[in-house]
Structure formats: structure tokens, C-alpha cells
Amino acid sequence: MRLRAVVALILLLALVPAPGYGQPRQLQADSSLDIGRWQALLGQPHVEGELLVRLRPGLSAASRPAALQDARTLETIPALGIIRYRIDGDLATALARLNADPAVAFAEPNYLLFPDFDPDDPYYVNYAANNSVPNGGYLNRMHMSQAWDITTGRSEIVVAVIDSGIDLDHEDLAGALWQNNDEIPANGLDDDQNGFVDDIYGWNFAGNDANVDDWLGHGSHVAGIIAARMNNGLGIAGIAPKTRVMAVGIFAPPGFGTFADLVKALLYATDNGASIINLSLGGTAYSRGEEMAVEYAVRHGVTVIAAAGNNGENVYHWPAAHPSAIAVGAVTAQDAPAWFTNTGDFVDLVAPGVNIWSLRFGGGYTTKSGTSMATPHVSGLAALILSRNPTLSPAEIRTILETTATDLGPIGRDDLFGYGRIDARAALEATPPYTGTFPSFTPDWLHQAVWPDFCIPLITDGDFETPLGTSWTLTGTAAITTTVSATGDHALFLAGAPQQQGAASQTFTIPTTADATTLAFALRVDNEDFDFGSDPTFPGRDHLSAWLRTADGQPLFELLRAGNADFYVASGLPWDRYLHVLTADELDALKQNGPVQLWFYADNGPDERPTRFFVDDVRFCAGSHPTFLPRILTAPPPP
């Protein structure tokens, strides 16, 4: 069993000073708190003045802990309930107070993390030199030629490379890049309503923009090991040369990223169609927020594979040490442990990691070493396994990888090699072939009237097309209108007059077997006189809320508040889309409540400029997240 310990951070490349924000005022220390413990944690590289905090479910922002009253909210990560705060005071004192507060699930520094590559050692031996093919010695040991006789991958399988970006113009990645086909390039709009503007090839969380072109070279090298094209007369062949890679950037110059950006990157990759996530990065600082993000991905069908780290010690390295991740160490061409690889009871597998040929950003090829290079070998093999059978879960993929690995060292699992060095032929031979029709990638689910088959609907008549009162309970100014609708002929119409309120609700029960639930609906906000677009200013006290409540009307979770400073939707636009993925805590609480109620509530203030709200296409899906295509979560029958 893996232990979740907090250990001192040993840098993988170089110690990078955290960015300075000036001298914060000092909070008065509380002698009853163990400040020293938190000061020790702050000895590890982190963003000065920033904390990641998760409040207990059901706590409103207005009732947040006293230690956060003067804090500035920098951003929220709704799917996990995590908030990033700027603390103008002593960080150790704030950490101690928050973690002693029963209203706080956890508070932690916004740690820094680093790529796991290229220990700077002049005595590396090119262990693959005995074979004329680049990486040939490694490929032969992994039986890649025989594995490729079974499958070379499928384009429907996408591996997210969370890293420094990918060289989008490299000749050996032509046709290998994931593309968001629902985005129109460079139009400055979020065409697919996923929250990211012009994310054609992915998203750069370090720069908060769509520029995912590599600047460091690390991400391109990793991507090439996974998916460099085969039989194109160029350079190398990736492990899964017919799959695709999604570029997700989190590293900024000079070469570090933050845990907050990694959390968001994991959610992005999960929510936008990745089947596998490669993490050739990490550090020795434990983060509960990071662990929640890894669990989120795996819970939603994504296999997370991470580097064990390059400290050359028996030391925990996260995110690889999280139990839901597959931790990968590095070996030489002779299957000996690479001198830099971390070992320990968290290591699951090993793969080649010394002098690995792959892509150099800007063109050409180069060698790099590290657990960063070992990890994409396993990610590529996992992509081949899914290409042979896309119905497999992360747990089933893990089992295949571990049970077919070549056992090295002592018989059975050990701390040096885990379950052994991966064997591609054995893994694919152990993978039961899928005999159904392989699905095409269809990311545009939110704009379709019908959801995918694996969505178990919980809401009846989310289109408001059945006779009034059949499925929804309407009160106050709430009504069904035929004047404006997103699809069909009807929509829900709420409020629209000074000091008026309206509500619509429906009661349902979430199955106890549901492992994920998603709420989505179309929303339209119009200003005073239906003057579409001429005056998009909101009256500040008019708002629409979406809540989950108990069957007798007691509030559980507020999902949306539109029309005030918390959340803006442009007035006069045809329709906006709203999506909320329930967190694990929210889902567990709802299951325990039995029947629950989805409640839309609109309230207009006393001013003479009322706001009208329209809701349509309500979907509450249990079972799995709809954006997980192309993974097959409910396999169609064989033809």
C-alpha cells in the first residue's frame, strides 16, 4: 500500500526562486497553532502569497473562514471545489488557521513542479548504440515489432501531454496532433463553449492562452516517443504511431509550473476527450488538490501515467505516488535501473529512459534521459491497448501492463522495478480484441438535441415541450414560452418585472451506482425590453440561480448565479451554454439524500430595468461525463 507522506522537495533541474510579490503584512501568530509544521512545508518551492483551499461542501463564500476574510480570490476550480487565494499576510499562520478550521477540507501552498528529464551527467553511455535503428535496442526488448503487427494505434485514441507544449510544425508529428474541430481558428470566440477561446490544439495554462507551441523542447520529445509517425521516411517511430497527442502547457520560463495549473490541466484533458494523460513531471511535495484532480481523471475513465522522478533515491514523487496514477521508473538498455531513477513502494513499472531518441523542437532529433522519457513509453503502450479495445477501464489497463511486464530483480513486485519492464507484445496479446464498431470522435455533444447513449437521463422534459405542469413545478413569474427557444418550440421563461421572482423545479433520484453526473442547460439573458445586443449591461441586483435542494426545499448546492458580479452571461446573445460536473463530495451527498430537486430561481431587484431569463435544453446525465468520447463507456453490441 502506498503511503501518502509529505517529504522535502529535492529539485529535479535547478532551484528556481519563487516569484516575489513584495513584503506581505504579518498576521499575528496564534500560539495554540503548530506554525512550525507549516513553515517547514513552505521551505519547498511555491508561489509566494498563494494558497489552494477547499471548503467543506455546503459552505457559501459569504461564510468563509476568518483567515480568508481579507484574502483575494484569484480563481476557482469548480469541478473540484478548489479556490486559489492571494494571502496578504504570513502564509504559515494562514495555513495553520485554515487547516484547524472544521469548515476547511484542506489548505496548501501553490507548490511548483518541474520536468523530469536530462540529469546533467557527462558519462552517459548510448546504450542503444548496438543497434543501427534509433532506440532499436529498447524497442527489441519491448518486442515492439511484434506488437505493431497487432496494432499501430488508432486516431480516435488521444494522449494528453501535459508539459511545455508540443512543436506543432515538427515534420514527424504531421497528422499526430489532436485538434478541437469545434473551434474556428483565430476568431477570438469560444465556439464550442468549453471555456477556452481558440483552443485548436489544446491550452497553455501557464500563459492562459491557446499558444501551445513548445518553448523548452521537453514536451516535443515526450510527444514524439508516444506518437511520432511511422513509415514516413523520417526520424523515428513513436510507440503508438497512429494515435494523436493533445498539447496542454503548464511550464513557463525558466522551466517550472504550478500545482494550480496542473490541476486545471488535468481537468481540461479529461473534459476534452483525452483517453490517457502523460505526466513527465512532478516534485516531492504532496498536494491533496493535485490528488483530487488525478482521481477526477481516473474516475472519468482516463488513465494517468506519471514519472517516478529523477532524485536517484527511495523518495515519494508526486503526482506519480498518488494511488490512482501509474508510476514509471527508468531502466537502461540492459534493464538495469537508471542511476537517476527514483525507487520505492509507489513504483508500478519501468521503461527505457536513458539516451532516448525523439523530437527536437524546431526540427530534427535529439536524445534525452530521465523518467520523463520512460513515462511516454508506457503511455504509448496504453494507447495501443486502448486501440485494440477501447472499452477497457484504467484499472483494466493497469492490470494488463503490470501482469505482462518482464519481471526484473527479485521475483514479483519490488521497489526497484515495480512489476517489471513493459512488454508491448505480451500486453497486446493479453488485451481482448474489441469486436464492435469503433466510434468516431464526436465532441459536439452539448450542441446536439440528443445526448450520447451512455447518458442516463435524470430530468424529464428538459426541453419544456410537454404540457404545462407535467414534469416541472412552476411558481411566481415562471412560465413556458413559445416566443424564444434554443431548440424545439418552447423554453422556460423566468421573471421580467421589478421585484418579481419565479422558480421552476423538478424532483428526481440519482442512482447509487452512478460514478459521475453532469448538469447542462442552455441559458439566455435579455435586458429590459428585449433589445438584443444594444445594451448588454446587467441590472446588478437581477439574477438567475440554479440549485440542487432536498425534496422538501432545503438548499444543498448552488450551481450557478448569473446576472451579478459572480457570473456574467452576455445579454442579447442567442444562447449561452452552462455545464457543471458534480464533484465526488457533491455526488455522495446527493445519493445520501434520496430524492433531490433541481431548482431554477430568478429574482429581479426594485429598479425599473428588469432582466428576463430563459432556460432550455436541460440535461442531467448520470453514469459518466458526456465529453469522454471517444472512449466507449457503454459498448455497442458486436455487428
Image (spheres, rainbow, N blue to C red):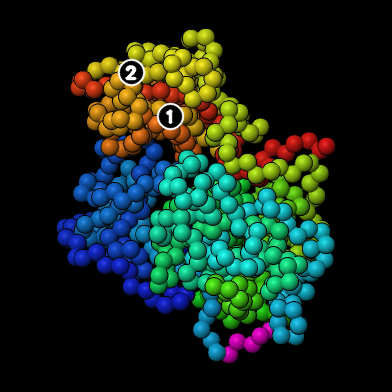
Residue at mark 2: 495
State the predominant SS element of the stretch in magenta.
Answer: loop
Label 2 element class: loop
Point out residue 525 in the picture as x, y percentages from the top left corner.
Answer: 36, 27
Position of residue 144 in the picture relative to residue 126 (left or right): right
For badge 1, the amino acid type reads: Pro
Find residue 423 and name its label: none
Q: Which residues are magenta?
A: 123-127
Point out residue 89 in the picture as x, y percentages from the top left corner.
Answer: 21, 58
Q: Quadrant of residue 613?
A: top left
Quick check: 212 above or below 68?
A: below
Q: Nearer the viewer, mark 2 or mark 1?
A: 1
Residue at mark 1: 574
Mark 2, Cα crowd under 10 Å, few <14 / some 14-19 / many 20+, is: many
Q: Quadrant of the C terminus?
A: top right
C-alpha span from label 2 to label 1: 18 Å
